[in-house]
Image: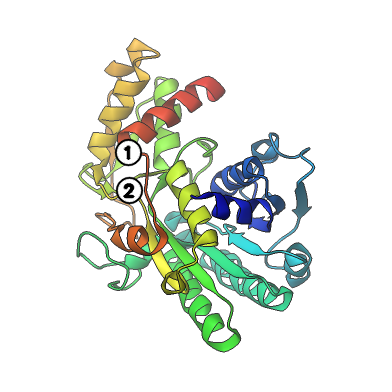
Amino acid sequence: MDTNQLELLSSSKILVTGAAGFIGSNLCQALIEIGSKVVALDNFATGHKKNLLSVKDHPNFIFIEGDIRNLNDCNKACEGVDFVLHQAALGSVPRSINDPITSNEVNVSGFLNMLVASRDAGVKRFIYAASSSTYGDSKALPKVEDKIGKPLSPYAITKYVNELYADNFKRTYDLDTIGLRYFNVFGRKQDPNGAYAAVIPKFVMQFMKYESPVINGDGTFSRDFTYIDNVIQMNLRAMVSDNPASLNNVYNTAFGERTTLNELTTLLKEYLSEYDAAIANIEVKYGPERKGDVPHSLASVDKAKELLGYDPKYDMKSGLKEAVKWYWDNLK
């Protein structure tokens, strides 16, 4: 980003919802380092206070404990805000299958509350976490933004509804929005614990405990694993873009390469065995496929490169090395 864009961010007040979560806390850290004034909103349903320890005492950081399902909390958080980075959501396809009602309350009703609060507060731009799950049963690869299929889970439905609401709020209320379809984001601060932990931190922790990770299916399912720093860059570029054509769009947020789960576990064993040679000998197990899982995911990032100037710096391997080092240093 150029000097003018950095000056825009350093002079702005930015709300991050879901701020105590994996992506939200990394965004808070990046914005504080730039010099932005940051308002953080979280109810700690899935986020952790420890994720905000590095910024919580900074004079430019304000934390509000609140729930996006409460419109008053949303209104309070949006007061005087220039930009909203809306990360708050209940993630996980299996979670949404087990409890579709709560996923809908948070991901749809909560999202709508945030749009209304942003509209009423005169927010300049509303950037939100969309999802690659929106591509559903579309078999086309790579995934291109204007070609989607039918959603395969309640979670995917909620994230698609977000896109519809965002588009409608531009048409109806002239609120500028940008949706970022995240593709399997990973990196520092991603929680390895819990029933709905993402695959990379979960497998890392299992290997470090000399446990065999279980792959759902035969390991040939593939994902466009996306390192957190690429995601931070996309959020920053979505705020500063002065290209009118870039607004009120959705963008794939990924690197643009595909890795199978078998390849992933091989790489994890290789990188972790640099710290502990015994990990190289741990066997991987296989279980049944999960309901609602998309077999293959690969993003085209051409649209983001053209309209937002996106320039991802970390491919999957370089990001994975960084992530493994962070887990080893912080959680071993």
* Callout 2 secondary element: loop
User: Farthest top residue?
Assistant: 277
| Image marks 2 and 1: residues in contact by CB distance under 8 Å | yes
Tell whether 164 sits left or right of 112: left
Q: Identify whether 43 is placed above or below 146.
A: above
The kind of residue tagged 2 is Phe
Q: Determine which residue is flagged by label 2.
A: 255
Residue density around tag 1, few if under 14, some if 14–19, many if 20 or more, within 10 Å: some
Question: Could you tell me the amino acid type at mark 1?
Answer: Met
Q: Which residue is mark 1?
A: 316
Horizontal and vertical percent for residue 124?
Answer: 63, 70
Quick one: label 2, few (<14), some, or many (20+) residues within 10 Å?
A: many
For marks 2 and 1, give the CA distance.
8 Å
Residue 46's spot in the image, x, y percent? Answer: 61, 48
Q: Position of residue 155 (x, y in %)?
A: 45, 64
* Residue drawn at point x = 66 percent, y = 43 percent: 32
Dot placed on the residue nearer the N-terminal end, 2 or 1: 2
Give the camera-side residue of 243 and 187: 243
Residue furthest to the bottom in view is: 172
Relative horizontal placement of residue 180, taking residue 271 as reference (left or right): right
Point out which mark residue 256 bears. Answer: none
**Residue at 66%, 50% in the rendered image:** 10
- Report the number of numbered marks: 2
Q: Quadrant of residue 108?
A: bottom right
At x 65% / y 70%, what residue is drawn? 114
- Asked if residue 332 shows in the view, the reply is no
Q: What SS does tag 1 mark?
A: helix
Residue visible at 67% across and 35% down? 50
Q: Quadrant of residue 123?
A: bottom right
Q: Is residue 27 visible?
A: yes
Is the image coloured rainbow, by chain, by secondary structure, or in one colour?
rainbow
Residue 82 vs residue 186, the one in the foreground: 82
